[in-house]
Amino acid sequence: MYIIVGLGNPAKEYEGTRHNVGFDVIDAIADKYNISVTERKHRAFCGKGLVAGQRVILVKPQTYMNLSGESVRSVLDFYKVDEETELIVIFDDVSLDVGQLRIRKKGSAGGHNGIKNIIQHLGHNVFQRIKVGVGEKPKEYDLADYVLGHFSKEDKERMADGYKRAVEAVEMLVMGDIDGAMNEFNKKVVKE
C-alpha cells in the first residue's frame, strides 16, 4: 500500500495557488482513478482506491502547509507502511520551471516549510517525493506572496500538462520503478 500525500493549504482562498499544486495533483489522480478524497481523518481529507493496480491512500492534509508533518505522521502511524518506500509526497518547487517535475528518493527541505515539518515529524529525510515546478519568484516579489499567488493563463496550461505528467510519475512510483520515473520525468521540458 502507498500513502500519496499532496501538500497545500485548506480554505477557498488558496485554491489554484502555486503552493497548492500538491492538492491539485491529488485531485488529478482522484479524477483519473475515480477515488473520492472526502473522508476526514488524520487531520486530512483521505481517499482509498487503486492506482495502476496498487492500493493507495490519497491524502490532502488540512493542517496548513507548515504543519503538514502532523497529518502525515498520523496517517503513517495508522497504516504502518514503510515510509522510506511507500510514502510519496507531492509539492510545489520555486526552483523548477512551471510544470517541470523532479523526483527524488530523499533530500533536504530546500526551504519548503511543509517538507521541513514532515522531515521533523519523521525524524529522517528518506521518502519519495515529486516536486512540481511553479516557476522562479520574480525579484520584486515576497516569496510567501508569490507561492500564495495564482497562475497566469499561460502558466495554467503548462501546469495542466505538469499535473498529467505527475500522475504518470505516481503510476510508475507505485509500480516500484522510481529509477525509471526519475529517468523519464527529471528531464527538462522544452517549451514550445
Image (cartoon, rainbow, N blue to C red):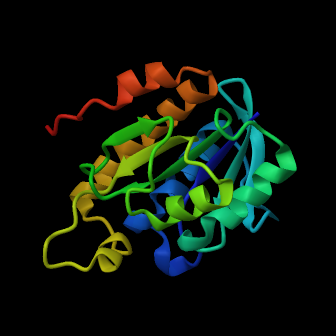
Residue 53 vs 134, above or below: the answer is above
Residue at figure coordinates x 22%, y 56% from the top left: 154
Numbered disc total? 0
Residue at figure coordinates x 20%, y 78% from the top left: 141
**Near-viewer residue (98 or 2):** 2
Residue at figure coordinates x 51%, y 49% from the top left: 90
The percent position of residue 105, horizontal first and vertical second, equals 50, 35
Residue 185 vs 22, above or below: the answer is above
- Apparent side of residue 160 relative to residue 175 in the rendered image (left or right): left
Asked where in the image residue 93 lies, by quadrant, the reply is bottom left
Q: Quadrant of the C terminus?
A: top left
The percent position of residue 65, horizontal first and vertical second, equals 54, 70
The percent position of residue 13, horizontal first and vertical second, equals 48, 80
Asked where in the image residue 45 lies, by quadrant, the reply is bottom right
The percent position of residue 107, horizontal first and vertical second, equals 45, 45
Q: Quadrant of the N terminus?
A: top right
Residue 48 vs 6, above or below: the answer is above
Residue 20 vs 182, above or below: the answer is below
- Apparent side of residue 38 relative to residue 115 in the rendered image (left or right): right
**Near-viewer residue (3 or 10):** 3
Asked where in the image residue 49 lies, by quadrant, the reply is top right
**Near-viewer residue (74 or 36):** 74
| Most distant residue in the front direction | 123
Residue at figure coordinates x 55%, y 58% from the top left: 23
